[in-house]
Amino acid sequence: MSGQGSGGNVLAAVCSFIIPGLGQLVQGRLLPAFLFFVIVGVNYFFMVLIIPAVIGGIFHLWSIIDAARFKSMI
């Protein structure tokens, strides 16, 4: 059983650092992966407006932390 700080969670956090939501996808969590990818992607797309870039950065950081702290219920 993988706990917090396990190698799988570290890999997922690194994946989410590279592409938001990829860490959740590696963990098999499709809905959070899709939501993080879309929310961060849309906000980064409108980066020129400054506020979306800040919001995108916050969600990107949240996706990394979420992937690192995930605990499987199995």
Image (cartoon, rainbow, N blue to C red):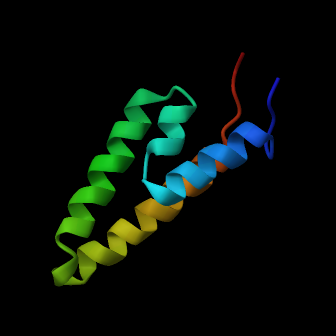
Q: Position of residue 23 (x, y in %)?
A: 53, 43
* For residue 71, above or below residue 50: above
User: Within the image, what quadrant is residue 56 found in?
Assistant: bottom left
Q: Position of residue 29 (x, y in %)?
A: 49, 29
Q: Position of residue 62 (x, y in %)?
A: 51, 58
**The C terminus is located in which quarter?**
top right
Report how many numbered discs are placed on residues in the image. 0
Q: Residue at x 29, y 54 (%)?
A: 39
User: Within the image, what quadrant is residue 58 found in?
Assistant: bottom left
Relative side of 33 to 14, left or right: left
Q: Residue at x 80, y 40 (%)?
A: 6
Q: Position of residue 10 (x, y in %)?
A: 71, 48
Relative side of 28 to 1, left or right: left
User: Within the image, what quadrant is residue 55 found in?
Assistant: bottom left
Relative side of 11 to 18, left or right: right
Q: Nearer the viewer, residue 19 or 56?
A: 19
Q: Residue at x 38, y 31 (%)?
A: 31
**The N terminus is located in which quarter?**
top right
* For residue 66, above or below residue 34: below
Of all residues shown, which one is farthest toward the top?
A: 74
Relative side of 56 to 3, left or right: left
